[in-house]
Amino acid sequence: MKSFYKQLMLAAVLVGLVIAGTMMNPHSASATSAATLITIAEAGSPVSIYLCTTGTGPSCGNQSYTVGAGQHLIIEYVSGECLMTANPGTTFYLTDLSLQLTTGGQFNGHYVATPINNFVASPNTSASFTFAQPTRLYADPSTQVTLAQTFGSSGGSAGVQVCHMTISGRLITL
């Protein structure tokens, strides 16, 4: 019986060593996958793109950006500011603010979260608010990324309506 017990204990120890050895030696596929992910995440050239759109008021710059042929744009972060002014007694509102782009051949609008959407104007009143949010959007080669907004007013006439946005991300050359 003692001989059987010793053999059983020896087998258990050997099995434990085999399991421990396997766990301590990582598989090469795991290391390769992690390295590949890091390479993909860091690929491309960093870009910062300024876009601007107006409801009324003077032109403020480019409303669209065209992704180059043979390139993909990865948008990682958006930030900006919207300014609204109105005449006294006017209710003025921003209905939506979005980036419109084509991903995988499909045209889409992606809405940006904004902290305010309306106010009632009094003499010389204006509202300005900022926004910033991380994101992950992809734009196809030779397509446009456009900043779009919908402003409106009731009970009077609107003044200046303008939104500025900076897009940060990476351009990947294919």
Image (tube, rainbow, N blue to C red):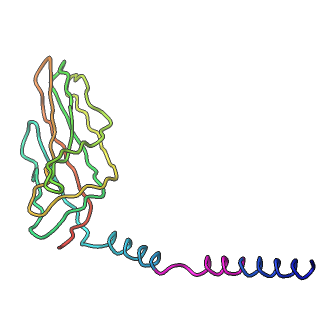
Q: Quadrant of the C terminus?
A: bottom left
**Residue 133 pos. (x, y %):** 33, 49
Question: Would residue 62 appear left or right of 97 to someone viewing this image?
Answer: left
Q: Which residue is nearer to you in this view: 90 or 152? A: 152
Query: Is residue 13 part of the magenta span, yes or no?
Result: no
Rendered location of residue 29, percent (x, y): 44, 77
- Residue 46 horizontal/vertical position (percent): 26, 69
Please check the rendered image and state whether residue 25 is part of the magenta-colored stretch, yes or no. Answer: yes
Q: Is residue 104 left or right of residue 78?
A: left
Q: Residue at x 15, y 20 (%)?
A: 154
Residue shown at 25% from the left, 58% from the top: 75
> Which one is nearer the viewer's eye here, 31 or 41?
31
Tell me where residue 148 sits by quadrant: top left
Q: Tell me where residue 36 sits by quadrant.
A: bottom left
Whether 168 is drawn above or below 161: the answer is below
**Magenta stretch, residue numbers:** 16-28
Would you say the magenta stretch is mainly helix, strand or loop? helix
Figure disc tally: 0
**Residue 65: horizontal and vertical position, in percent?**
12, 57
Q: What residue is drawn where x is 18% and y is 58%?
A: 139
Q: Nearer the viewer, residue 82 or 87?
A: 82
